[in-house]
Amino acid sequence: MLLKENIPFRYVFGKIRYEVLFITLYAVAIVLLYNNFHFTRISIPLAVPAILGTVISLLLGFRSNQAYDRWWEARHIWGAIVNDSRTLTRQILCFTEVEYEGDAIQHMRERFVKRQMAWCYSLGKNLRGLNSREGLDRFISRKEQEFVSHYTNVPAALLELHARDLNKALEMGWINQFQQVELDRTLSRLCDSMGKCERIKNTVFPVTYSQYIHFSLLLFIGLLPFGVIQYFGFMEVPVVVAIASCFLLIEKMAIHLQDPFENKPTDTPMTAISNTIERDLRQMLKDQELPEQTEQQALQFYVL
């Protein structure tokens, strides 16, 4: 959703505020024991947490890379949806250009193109777990709304309506068999893109892998105060908090990126992309009613 806006500091550290608070209290307790009660034997060689921190850094780097791959694949798929939506509109408009364009052909064109706009918005909401039928009345007729209401997967129902219109156009002689095949190929690519998005959405990142890294990270943070206490004294508290915050933020970043369809500021900007598709398709349709360009959504909804 958010592409260029800076994410507020409050939102970023709000994700780890409880962890940071606990680590601060923990580090303060260690420094009080060391300096005020002279528990000097609690210090350990710095090499112990350093080695563990190096291993965790490698694991976090690998996980962040895998999470980013999922996010980038999702963005790549939606880039293909943009291209295929424009291609489908161009094909349906050009293939149905005949010497005499009746009202039936023009009505079919408008219905088909607006249904494609509805498909983009509906797919985005469906992936985010929202009501995928909301807002469809702007694009499709009441009869088509009634048709898709019987489907759990609304985007799939809209593609089925696309296919029915292509069969009707072929029967009426508005397109020939070769054109029908090309249009069907474009629909198949859109269906493939929808399936790829659903695969990313429904494939859970391995829970055991996440838990092992998290437990190792907690062990590293727990040992860190004992390794730096003899070098920094009371300054051990901000040092430990700063290092722990860096590791925790990297872990949170990977968690957010691994789920690109969860309606968060870091997810794929499907609403903005759908808005761009709608604007382009309306212009191709010679429609003067262009949508307003969506601004990047404010973070007030998320910073709660």
Image (cartoon, rainbow, N blue to C red):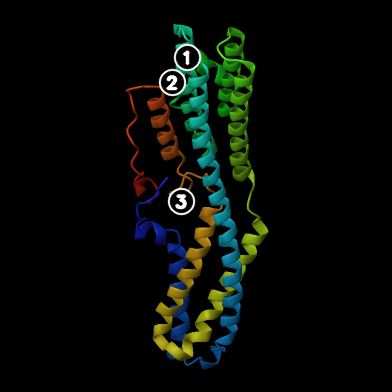
Q: Earlier in the sequence, mark 2 or mark 3?
A: 2
Which residue type carries mark 1?
Arg
- Marker count (numbered): 3
The image shows residue 286 at horizontal and vertical percentages of 37, 22
Q: Which residue is mark 3?
A: 266
Give the numbered dot on residue 178.
none
Secondary element under disc 2, as helix, strand or loop, is helix
Identify which residue is drawn at 48% across, 31% down: 86
Local crowd size for mark 3, using a 10 Å CA cut-off: few (<14), some (14–19), many (≥20): some
Image spot of residue 199 (x, y percent): 63, 42
| Label whose residue precedes the other's in the sequence (1 or 3) | 1
Mark earlier in primary sequence (2, 1): 2
Rendered position, 111 above or below 256: above
The answer to whether residue 205 is above or below residue 16 is above
Image quadrant in which you'd find residue 60: bottom right
Q: Amino acid at mark 2?
A: Asp
Query: Do labels 1 and 3 touch, CB within 8 Å?
Result: no
Which residue is under mark 1?
142
x and y, in percent, of residue 289 in the image: 33, 23
In the image, residue 218 sits, relative to residue 42, either above or below, namely above
- Amino acid at the residue labelled 3: Thr
For the point 59% across and 17% down, the residue is 166
Q: Secondary structure at mark 1?
A: helix
The answer for how far apart the CA atoms under marks 2 and 1 are is 7 Å
Residue 32 horizontal/vertical position (percent)? 43, 85
Residue at (53% x, 59% y) in the render: 254
Residue topped by disc 2: 137
- Furthest residue toward front: 99
Determine contact: label 2, label 1, CB under 8 Å: yes
